[in-house]
Amino acid sequence: MDYGETVRRLDYQNMKEMLWEAVEGLEEKQAEVIRCRFLDHKTLRETGELIGITKDAVVHQQNNALRLLGQPGRCRKYRGYYEEYLAASCYHHVGLEAFSRTWTSEVEREAMR
C-alpha cells in the first residue's frame, strides 16, 4: 500500500469517527435508530421491533436525526471530508423513489458505512 492510500484510508476513518460522534450527540432514540439502520443494517421493521416503536416512528426518528446531522452547525466538522472524498466518489444511483422512501442519499449512506 502506498503512502497516499494510507493517508486516504486514515482520513476516511477519521471522518467516520467524527460522524459517529455526531450521531452520539443526538437524542437517545434518534441515535439508536441511526445505529440500527446504518451500522447493523436493520430494516425499518426490525429497527422498530428492537427499539419498541412502530415502523412509522422509526421513519420519523430517522428523518429527524438525518436532518439534525445535516444542520450547518453539526456537519461543519466533516464537511471537508464530504467535499474531498464522498462528493467525488462514484455511487450507485438509487433514484428519487428510493430517496423519497428513505430520505437518505447515496452520500449519507456511504458516510454511515
Image (cartoon, grey):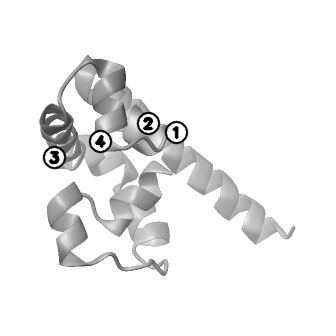
**Residue that numbered label 1 is attached to:** 17
What separation in Å lies between label 1 and label 2 (alpha carbons)? Answer: 5 Å
Answer yes or no: do the residues labelled 2 and 4 have beta carbons within 8 Å?
no
Please state which amino acid type lies under the numbered disc 1: Glu
Answer yes or no: do the residues labelled 1 and 2 have beta carbons within 8 Å?
yes
Can you see residue 58? yes
Q: Single out the mark in the foreground, 1 or 3.
A: 3
Q: Within the image, what quadrant is residue 88 found in? A: bottom left
Can you see residue 33? no
* Label 4 vs 3, first from the N-terminus: 4
Please state which amino acid type lies under the numbered disc 2: Trp
* Label 2 vs 4, first from the N-terminus: 2
Please state which amino acid type lies under the numbered disc 4: Leu
For the point 43% across and 44% down, which residue is it? 38
Residue 70, position as x, y percentages in the image: 21, 50
Residue 12, position as x, y percentages in the image: 58, 55
Count of marks placed on residues: 4
**Residue that numbered label 4 is attached to:** 44
* Label 1 vs 4, first from the N-terminus: 1
Residue 42, position as x, y percentages in the image: 42, 40
**Residue that numbered label 3 is attached to:** 67
Q: Secondary structure at mark 3?
A: helix
Please state which amino acid type lies under the numbered disc 3: Arg
**Label 3: few (<14), some (14–19) or many (≥20) C-alpha neighbours in 10 Å:** few
**Residue that numbered label 2 is attached to:** 20
Answer yes or no: do the residues labelled 1 and 3 have beta carbons within 8 Å?
no
